[in-house]
Amino acid sequence: MASVYYKCWVCGKIFGKQELEPFSEKALREGYAFIRCPVCGSKLVVKARKSSPTKVEAV
């Protein structure tokens, strides 16, 4: 299973779900349930692209 990585639009930090889980537990206690950057707290988070291109053989 491939791990999902996210990128903060504001600070550029790339983080995975393992870094996001402790932050989301705190968020649930405070009453909101959306993804935030664990570094700067921004809500502008996108899925990061793969670093290597996918090779596809011709048919």
Image (cartoon, helix red, strand yellow):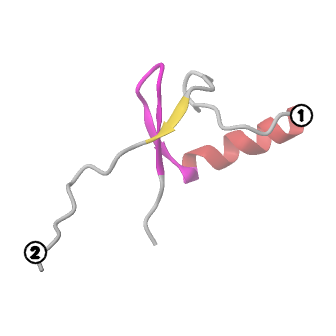
Circle 2/circle 1 CB separation < 8 Å: no
Q: In the rendered image, which quarter contains the C terminus?
A: bottom left
Please check the rendered image and state whether residue 33 is part of the magenta-colored stretch, yes or no: no
Q: Secondary structure at mark 2?
A: loop
Image check: 19 left or right of 51? Answer: right
User: Which disc is residue 58 wearing?
Assistant: 2
Please check the rendered image and state whether residue 12 is part of the magenta-colored stretch, yes or no: yes
In the image, residue 48 above or below residue 55: above
Q: Position of residue 29 (x, y in %)?
A: 88, 38
Q: CA distance from mark 2 to mark 1?
A: 51 Å
In the image, residue 46 above or below residue 39: below
Q: Nearer the viewer, residue 58 or 14?
A: 58
Q: Indicate the quadrant where residue 57 lies.
A: bottom left
Amino acid type at mark 2: Ala
Amino acid type at mark 1: Gly
Q: According to the image, label 1 marks what residue?
A: 31
Among all residues in the image, which is located at the extreme left?
58
Q: Which residues are magenta?
A: 5-18
In the image, residue 43 above or below residue 16: above
- Mark in front: 2 vs 1: 2
Q: Nearer the viewer, residue 28 or 43?
A: 43
Q: Indicate the quadrant where residue 11 lies.
A: top left
Q: Residue at x 87, y 32 (%)?
A: 30
